[in-house]
Structures are given as C-alpha cells and as structure tokens.
Image (cartoon, rainbow, N blue to C red):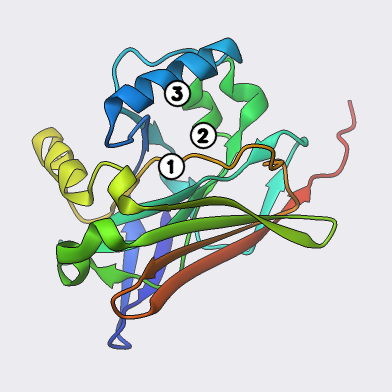
Amino acid sequence: MATLTFELPDGSTRAVDVVRLLNAGYAGRGQEDVAAHVAELAELGVPAPSVTPALYPVSPYLAQQTEQVAVQHGRTSGEAEWALVVDADGDLLLTAACDHTDRALEVHGVAWSKNAGPDVLARRAWRLAEVEDRLDALTLRAWVTHRGAETEIQHGTLAELLTPGYWADVLRDRGDLAPGTVLISGTIPMAEGVDQFAERWRVELADPATGDTIRLAYDVVPMPEPIG
C-alpha cells in the first residue's frame, strides 16, 4: 500500500493510505473533440475505448510522490493532470499529478500501459471546497527536458477537462468515494512538434486568483540492461 502525505495551504498535513487508484481517460469536457482524438490514436494503433470517458483501475502502489521514475525503454512519457484524493476523514483534496505511461505498450492496451508506470503526485494539495468556485480558471502546465533544455509541452485550464465534481459523482455511484481513493483526471492536448519522450517532466497546477501553485517534477531514469 502506498502512503501519500500532502501539505495544505494552512500548513497542516494529511496522510492518505492509497487503497484504490483510478485513471480517467478521454476525459475532455468536449466529447466531440475526444472522439476526434480517439480517431487520431486509432491511426497510431492505440485501441479505441468501448465508451468515453473511460476509467482504468491502476495498482494502488503506483501512486507515488517521487523525484525519479525508472523506465525500461525510451518510449514512455508523462501527462499533466489533476488528482482528486479522498483523505482519511473523507475530505476531497485536489493536487497536481503526472501519469507516466508506457507508449510502446499502449498500442496493445491502454489499461496495461497505465499499470506499467507510476502516477506521480505533488506533495501539496488544496481542499477541493476552497477552489471549487473557480475550478475552470485553474491552469495546468507541463514542461519536458531534453539534454538540459526545457520546453513547454502542455498548457491549458481545468475548463478543458471533466470536473472533479463529475468524477466524485461517478465514484459515489460506484461506491468508491471512500478514504484512500485517488483519481487521476485525464490530460489536456500536447503541443505539436514537442518530443514527449523526455529525460525530465515538470507539472504545475496554478490558481491565478491567489497566485498559489502546486508543483511536481521528476527525472526519467533508464534501467540497466537486462541479462537474459
């Protein structure tokens, strides 16, 4: 079981023992755009989901707060996302996340690819209730690093994605809105022409109303060559 610890704006901390980890997919608020994206991925060999939005169960130990992600090959990448976390008291927290996915495996099954890398979460969070009235204005950005040079690869707002409230209702209907549940939101589009297969990923979830920003970053570290 993974245990995550989050610092809140008032300086208090919340520890969460993760018992259920779920990754949303194809979770754009405009489902017509999602349908177009599904078609684009199909041309790359990624199987289409049976329904959209999709929801993929992920092994709970893959929820991590880490500065390094070990990978087996060069075709893995992150995705800037928000995460909804149900803490031990049942309170809903919102934080930044980066779903590190095996793109080579993705063509064989999206659910498999989600279980081949961690969901990296930030170490700070907001109470959802304290930002819920301005969620659409929150910004989500990501940068990738190649040979020491950083480039922005994602930049959008939470207005582009289905809301935490939407997913909270889905979880409640499933009986999963319980302490220890973590849901990762799905992502926003990546900039064309930017190489996602990077040596480092950095993600920010920012609140323009207060100037507060939740950050995470990690290095992508190749594993040693196997023997046999």
Q: Is residue 109 left or right of residue 161?
A: right
Residue corresponding to mark 1:
187
Count neighbours of disc 1 (C-alpha within 10 A) and say few if under 14, some if 14 to 19, many if 20 or more: many
Viewer-side residue, 45 vs 35:
35
Q: CA distance from mark 1 to mark 2?
A: 17 Å
The kind of residue on which mark 1 rests is Thr
Q: For residue 83, what is the image quadrant?
A: bottom left
Which mark, by number, is residue 115? 2
Residue corresponding to mark 3:
37
Name the residue at 51% across, 34% down. 115
- Please tell me which of labels 1 and 2 falls first in the chain: 2
Name the residue at 46% across, 25% down. 111
Q: In the displayed structure, would residue 60 be above or below residue 68?
A: above
Q: In the displayed structure, would residue 26 be above or below residue 107?
A: below
Q: Secondary structure at mark 2?
A: loop
Q: In the displayed structure, would residue 196 be above or below residue 220?
A: above
Which mark, by number, is residue 126? none
Q: CA distance from mark 3 to mark 1?
A: 12 Å
Q: In the displayed structure, would residue 149 be above or below residue 221?
A: below
Looking at the rendered structure, the number of numbered marks drawn on it comes to: 3
Q: For residue 102, what is the image quadrant?
A: top right
Farthest residue, direction bottom: 11
Relative image position of residue 72 (x, y in whole percent): 75, 37
